[in-house]
Amino acid sequence: MSVEQYNFLATCSIGCEPVLEKELKSLGFSRVKASRNLVRFSGTLQDGMRACLWSRCTSRVLLPLDSVHAPSAEEIYKQCMKLPWEEHLSTRSTFAVHGIGTNRGVRNSAFLAQKVKDAIADRLRNRYGKRPNVDRNDPDVSINAHLAGARLDLSLDLSGDSLHKRGWRIEETQAPIKESLAATILLAAGYDGKQPLVDPMCGSGTFLIEAAEIALGLAPGNRRRFAFERWPMIPKKTLDRFEDMRREGATPKNQEIPTIWGSDIERRMIRIAGQHIEGVGLTDYIRLEKKGAMRASFPENGSLLVTNPPYGERLKPEKDEDLPVLYKKLGEKWRDLGDGKLAVICAHEQFRKSFGLKPYKVIDLFNGPIRSPLFLYRIGGTWHENSQS
């Protein structure tokens, strides 16, 4: 089973595809190709497991099973009944179906999931005289059903919980940026762990932790469990090899890394960030300070400032200032930080104009459902404003 080649799908938010594609290539996967919302790649089953463990930018890793012609609810049930589900789960397994999509015969995703679930359960009952149990919250096997027109794509989800959940967040904040999106922003800005980094609006510490783990060479998934670890058909020796892989991913590859600074004007956010940083054992690598973003500074030349400033959707601006005024002040202040880069993700439609600096690149990203462009800037005397490299 370990030597057989599979075609996998790594899903992501719109705009993240090029960064995810580059990351998967750097991890050594073959036949890597980006499409909308996902990147395809090939490899062994253990490669799929390794993608779950090591990919910082993906949301889920899926193993496609089949595509069937299903123009109606009856055809969905009929076609799904033909598939060998007994190869992937047993009557002792719990399972769940996540349905997405509609057509003329299927008016909502919940009904789609119900028809696929019924077909799977009935096939196993016909074969073994017993149906497996459904567990929507914590299934052993999670199945994705994606319906577009008359085409139904069926996949196994290797991930379980979304891969942005690294396993360290102990307290939710008002507007956290997802860990996978934070990592995508860092990589898009050219961060490879060799540059000093500062986040002057660090919130719960997401950028800081992602940056430190990149610099240390730690696998982003080393603290969590994955759905494939409960699949009944995976041999124990395969899971034992993955456990060795996980232990290796939890071991720092570099003992010394450049300075990583985080600050925030709110004492509560500094406390939460400190708890998160302590929880993942990174207190020796990240420095925190309570201060406003106007007092930000580079640890040294060649630094990267990365941040997600307030944009009015869920957070109030610093000291209740008008947001465009805040952006203007930040642009005037940060342009004099020294030689380095700025990476700012902001959903406010007036940010670019108010900030005043000319970005060398703008990447259209989404923070959840909210369109949030990433603006990349070079500042300081050694950078040329019109350079594209």
Image (spheres, grey):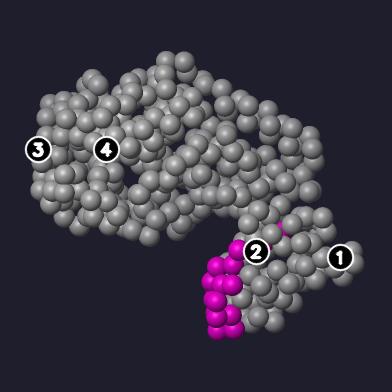
Q: Earlier in the sequence, mark 4 or mark 1?
A: 1
The spot of residue 91 in percent (x, y) is 83, 59
Percent coordinates x, y for residue 130 in the rendering: 86, 65
* Magenta-drawn stretch contains 96: yes
Q: Few, some or many C-alpha atoms within 10 Å of disc 4 (few <14, some 14-19, many ≥20)?
A: some
What amino acid type is highlighted by mark number 4?
Glu
Q: Secondary structure at mark 1?
A: loop
Q: Secondary structure at mark 4?
A: loop
Return the residue nearer the eye: 272 or 164: 272
Q: Which mark is residue 266?
A: 4
* Residue at point 16%, 44% (across, down): 319
Label disc, if present, on residue 7 of the rendered structure:
none
The reply to whether the C-beta atoms of the residues labelled 2 and 4 are less than 8 Å apart is no
Residue at 59% from the left image edge and 77% from the top image edge: 150
State if disc 3 and disc 1 touch (CB < 8 Å).
no
Residue neighbourhood size for the residue with mark 2, other residues' Cα within 10 Å, grouped as few (<14), some (14–19), many (≥20): many
| Residue 355: % across, % down | 14, 45
- 194 vs 131, left or right, is left
Name the residue that disc number 3 marks. 332
From the image, which quarter does the C terminus lie in?
Answer: top left
Residue located at (64% from left, 77% from top): 70
Splitting the image into 4 quarters, where does residue 380 fall? top left
Relative depth, front residue between 175 and 41: 175
Task: Give me the disc on residue 130.
Answer: 1
Residue 97: which disc?
2
- Residue range in magenta is 95-110
Whether residue 39 can be seen here: no
Displayed quadrant of residue 268? top left
Q: Earlier in the sequence, mark 2 or mark 3?
A: 2
* Separation (CA) of disc 1 from disc 3: 69 Å
Determine the CA span between mark 2 and mark 1: 18 Å
Q: Residue at x 33, y 23 (%)?
A: 287
